[in-house]
């Protein structure tokens, strides 16, 4: 464990890296949904600081970075993570051994310090283990209503959710690696579970996406009709959760869609 003095040094050096990152990212991402940088840019900031930290770790003489380097030399993990913070927010962070490091701590409340480091066990951070947990966080945090994916039911075992924001934006998800893993590792039972309780999307969303799909080249994942829960059962019976190529094809189909529509 780091001492208080070591924690202060690590925090200071990471805050300096964050300032360097801000100089690059602020002009590139001046706003997010009408809010000024850094609000909403948790992932972009975390990724940029992580990359810069990797570059500087073994060549820096700064004491805080040296303390991180010492932990890695002792075999501690050093990785990017995404998950839930007290089931209030989605969180992008960095783990160094048993330390939870948030280098984008001000992206929800800009009055908070840029960097926070706490023991992982005390952080309130955890991985997301179900779509129910994901929806519980997403609806208030993103200001959305979540529906079941009746629009592309053959894709729903991988991406069972339809989001409709207060602004009228509508999109499919969730396509990040962590939530795809929830679907696949559960043999699609996690997707089946959430599909069984979510309501169908509103009429405007269904009709809007139908119009989009008509303009796209035929793709089984996007255009095949049926019941989303039946597709979960079919993919499970065929053991398609084991097939990386099948998963990749689903992701490629998703990527061929527009990022969202307005309803």
Image (tube, helix red, strand yellow):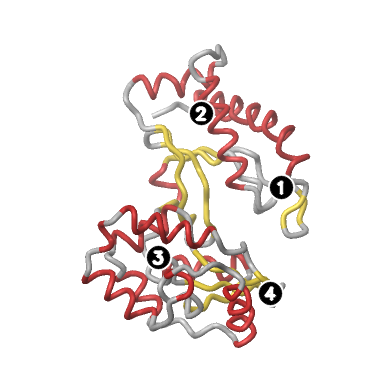
Q: Earlier in the sequence, mark 2 or mark 3?
A: 2
Count residues near mark 4 (Cα–Cα under 10 Å), then give few for <14, some for 14-19, many for 20+: few
Q: Which mark is residue 7?
A: 2
Contact, mark 4 vs mark 2 (Cβ under 8 Å): no
Q: Earlier in the sequence, mark 4 or mark 2?
A: 2
Which residue is the site of mark 4? 166
Across the whole image, how many numbered discs are drawn on residues?
4
- Residue 108, given in percent of the width and then of the height, sits at 65, 53
- When the figure is inspected, residue 75 is found, relative to residue 120, above or below; the finding is above
Q: Nearer the viewer, residue 54 or 100?
A: 54
Count residues near mark 1 (Cα–Cα under 10 Å), then give few for <14, some for 14-19, many for 20+: few
Mark 3 to mark 1: distance in Å? 38 Å
- When the figure is inspected, residue 231 is found, relative to residue 19, above or below; the finding is below
Q: Residue at the front extreme? A: 217
Tag nearer the camera, 4 or 2: 4
Q: Residue at the bottom extreme? A: 203
Quadrant of the frame with the C terminus: bottom right
Mark 2 to mark 3: distance in Å? 41 Å
Quadrant of the frame with the N terminus: top left
Q: Nearer the viewer, residue 175 or 13?
A: 175
Count residues near mark 2 (Cα–Cα under 10 Å), then give few for <14, some for 14-19, many for 20+: some
Secondary structure of the residue carrying tag 3 is loop
Residue at (48, 39) in percent of width and height: 94
Mark 1 to mark 4: distance in Å? 26 Å
Mark 3 to mark 4: distance in Å? 25 Å
- When the figure is inspected, residue 133 is found, relative to residue 175, above or below; the finding is below
Mark 4 to mark 2: distance in Å? 41 Å
Count residues near mark 3 (Cα–Cα under 10 Å), then give few for <14, some for 14-19, many for 20+: many
Residue at (44, 71) in percent of width and height: 160
């Amino acid at each position: 464990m780091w001492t208080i003095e070591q924690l202060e040094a690590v925090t200071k050096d990471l805050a300096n890296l964050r300032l360097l990152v801000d100089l690059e990212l602020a002009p590139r991402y001046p706003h997010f949904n009408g809010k000024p940088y850094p609000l909403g840019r948790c992932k972009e900031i975390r990724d940029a600081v992580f990359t810069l930290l990797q570059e500087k770790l073994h060549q820096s003489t700064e004491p805080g970075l040296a303390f991180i380097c010492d932990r890695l030399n002792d075999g501690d993990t050093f990785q990017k993570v995404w998950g839930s913070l007290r089931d209030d927010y989605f969180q992008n962070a960095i783990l160094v051994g048993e330390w939870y490091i948030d280098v984008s701590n001000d992206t929800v409340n800009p009055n908070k310090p840029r960097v926070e480091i706490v023991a992982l066990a005390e952080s309130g951070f955890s991985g997301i283990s179900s779509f129910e947990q994901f929806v519980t966080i997403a609806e208030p945090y993103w200001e959305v209503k979540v529906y079941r994916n009746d629009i592309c039911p053959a894709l729903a075992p991988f991406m069972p959710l339809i989001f409709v924001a207060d602004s009228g934006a509508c999109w499919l998800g969730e396509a990040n690696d962590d939530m795809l893993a929830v679907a696949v590792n559960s043999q699609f039972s996690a997707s089946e579970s959430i599909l069984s309780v979510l309501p169908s999307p509103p009429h405007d969303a269904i009709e809007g996406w139908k119009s989009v799909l008509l303009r796209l080249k035929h793709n089984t994942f996007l255009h095949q009709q049926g019941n989303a829960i039946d597709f979960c059962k079919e993919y499970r019976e065929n053991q398609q959760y084991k097939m990386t190529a099948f998963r990749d094809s689903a992701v490629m189909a998703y990527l061929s869609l527009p990022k969202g529509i307005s309803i």
